[in-house]
Image (tube, helix red, strand yellow):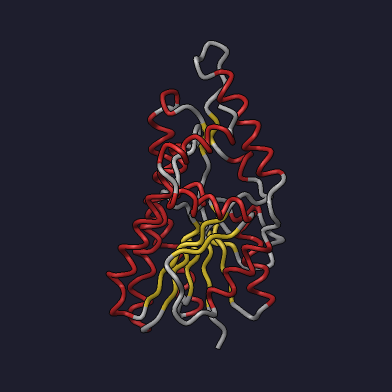
Amino acid sequence: MSKVVLITGGSSGIGKSVGEFLISKGFIVYGTSRFPEKYPASKFPIVALDVTDNQTITQAVGEVLLKEARIDVLINNAGVGITGPIEEIPETEIKNNFETNLFGPINVIKAVLPSMRAQGSGLIINITSIAGYMGLPYRGIYSASKGALELVTEAFRMELKDFNIHMTNVAPGDFATNIASGRYHAPVLESSPYHKPYGNTLKLMDSHVDAGKDPLLMAKAIYKIINTPNPKIHYKVGEFMQKFSVVLKRILPDKVYEKLLLNHYKL
């Protein structure tokens, strides 16, 4: 029997690539979008879901369960980027980022858990970020929201161990997607004390995305995880040096690691 996969944010970028790859491997895939009508040519059904709206979460999960009677794999992929000096980012934008990147995934997990528990199995894959392993300059809020999801996953795994429901994190590095165009950018203000360093860092971040890896690499990694009987807690996918930066943070003194980041961003 083909496994049923639900991918939040499945209309573009990593989510779209993962969905199309899994379909080619015989999975039944549903994606989500706030505006599913914009994607009539999608290779898999797109259902309406806004991760910041609990009612749409309940409706979307219910729709898939009504059609398929089960959800075997949830991929929490929907997320949003945010950049800027923390001092200058409006509080509403900080809260929105956590609503999307942390509270949203938690609420989607809550929505699928009863059916997974009833069927006696399930896999939940949370797409986080290598940025979630470190506080990055002018990406501090993004790092914090993704890092929080990493820790929530660690706790969730232990709470779910008696139900044969597995959960794991997949932290991508930079991939060639449209995330830069969709993220919130605090404006680079001429009058700001952060004008020059933030402006330069923003250009560097966007260039990293433009030169990022093919999202197909993420799709293949997730396919492998789905076929792993007992997935690890954390996976990292991307350029070697981006993955190695997590190792360096673990082994280097804090101030030495901070100096490496400052040098990398030319700050």
95 on left or right of 212: left
Q: Quadrant of the N terminus?
A: bottom right
The residue drawn where x is 38% and y is 30% is: 91
Q: Is residue 89 above or below residue 208?
A: above
Q: Is residue 195 above or below residue 32?
A: above
User: Is 140 or 63 nearer to us in this picture?
Assistant: 140
The residue drawn where x is 59% and y is 73% is: 223
Rendered location of residue 151, percent (x, y): 35, 56
Rendered location of residue 194, percent (x, y): 51, 19
Number of disc labels: 0
Q: Quadrant of residue 70?
A: bottom left
Rendered location of residue 87, percent (x, y): 41, 24
Rendered location of residue 134, percent (x, y): 45, 45
Q: Is residue 105 above or below residue 264?
A: below
Q: Is residue 11 at all visible to an observer of this figure? A: no
33 on left or right of 249: right
The residue drawn where x is 53% and y is 49% is: 245
